[in-house]
Image: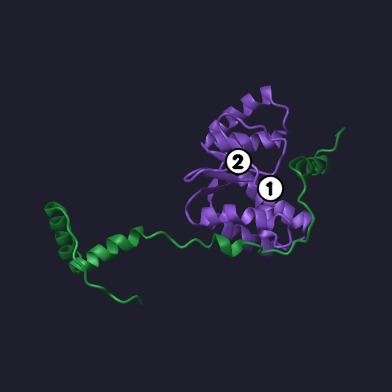
């Protein structure tokens, strides 16, 4: 399902990497989404978990230096709204743990998205199951 | 700087009086107070697209979340310790 105008979209780490990486085969596929956010048609969000994951991937997988990562992160968070885990995140996460077999880190991201009433979690992860509260949008499908 | 244009607008009397009073209190013109108020609501130009393709990271896919966390946690909290 493609996000409709005005939708609140939490951008997963794999989407951010595809957008930042000029050499990714998926880069051109993810650009239209960011153009819609840039135009104000969609609201773009990033969680503190995504910031940590993105920094880790850039540093450890792609060997980007810390200064360059810092500059990229600062620009991202100046253009997207940052959301943080709160008590509601923990409550939802606890419920998910009882009923889902997803990796706990996936559950925590989903719980953060739900606690902040996101309409979409934009992610390439195939194992995310659509919840009633937060829909999944995979721009590569 | 953009060129200025002269125009005519219609507004309720009470809004006009409020703006005129604000202009007087702020020692500016009626045009000045209208520009100030509208300028404050102008959306900031997004620089999000400046980040598109900021890095040249090659064609390698990023690790899954499991790979990302599990390998780190195995190092930090080895089984048996």
User: Which chain letter goes with mark 2?
Assistant: A
Give the position of the C terminus of chain B as an image quadrant. Answer: top right
Residue placed under numbered mark 2 in the picture: A121
Q: Which mark is residue A59?
A: none
Q: Is residue A131 above or below residue B31?
A: above
Q: Position of residue A68 (x, y in %)?
A: 67, 64
- The residue identified by callout 1 is A140
Chain letter of disc 1 in the image: A
User: Residue A63, relative to residue B2: is it above or below?
Assistant: above
Return the x and y of residue B48 as percentages of the image width and height: 55, 60
Label count reads 2
- Residue drawn at x 37%, y 60% is B42
Up-down relation of residue A83 to residue A131 (above or below): below
Neighbours of disc 2 within 10 Å: few (<14), some (14-19), many (20+): many
Q: With A51 as the anchor, is A87 left or right in this view?
A: left
Q: Earlier in the sequence, mark 1 or mark 2?
A: 2
In this view of the protein, which residue sits in the foreground, A97 or A12? Answer: A12
The image quadrant that residue A25 belongs to is bottom right
- Left or right position of A17 against B31: right
Q: Nearer the viewer, residue B19 or B73?
A: B19
- Tag 1 near tag 2, CB within 8 Å: no
Q: Which chain corresponds to the colour purple?
A: A
Label 1, label 2: how far apart the Cα atoms are: 14 Å
Residue B27 visible, this angle: no
Q: Nearer the viewer, residue A34 or A102?
A: A34
Query: Which residue is at the front of the view, B76 or A33?
Result: A33
Question: Where in the figure is residue A15, as x and y percent of width and height?
Answer: 66, 50
Which chain is tinted green?
B
- Quarter holding residue B58: bottom right
Sort mark 1 into few (<14), some (14-19) or many (20+) by Cα contacts within 10 Å: few
Secondary structure under the numbered disc 1 in the rendered image: loop
Give the residue at x 61% y 30%.
A131
């Amino acid at each position: 399902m493609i996000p409709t105008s005005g939708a609140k979209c939490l951008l997963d780490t794999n989407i951010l990497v595809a957008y930042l990486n000029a050499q990714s085969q998926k880069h051109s596929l993810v650009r239209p989404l960011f153009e819609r956010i840039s135009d104000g048609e969609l609201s773009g969000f990033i969680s503190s978990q995504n910031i940590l994951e993105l920094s880790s991937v850039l540093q450890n997988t792609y060997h980007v230096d810390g200064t360059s990562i810092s500059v990229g992160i600062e620009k991202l968070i100046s253009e997207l709204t940052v959301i943080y885990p709160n008590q509601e995140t923990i409550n939802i996460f606890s419920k998910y743990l009882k009923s889902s077999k997803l990796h706990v880190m996936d559950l925590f991201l989903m719980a953060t998205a739900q606690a902040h009433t996101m309409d979409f979690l934009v992610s390439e992860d195939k194992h995310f199951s659509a919840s009633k509260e937060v829909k999944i949008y995979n721009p590569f499908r | 700087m953009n060129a200025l244009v002269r125009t005519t607008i219609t507004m309720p009397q009470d809004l006009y009086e409020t703006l005129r009073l604000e202009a007087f209190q702020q020692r500016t013109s009626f045009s000045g107070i209208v520009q100030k108020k509208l300028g404050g609501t102008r959306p900031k130009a997004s620089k999000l697209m400046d980040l598109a393709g900021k890095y040249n990271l090659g064609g390698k896919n990023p690790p899954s979340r499991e790979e990302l966390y599990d390998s780190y946690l195995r190092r930090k909290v080895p089984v048996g310790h």
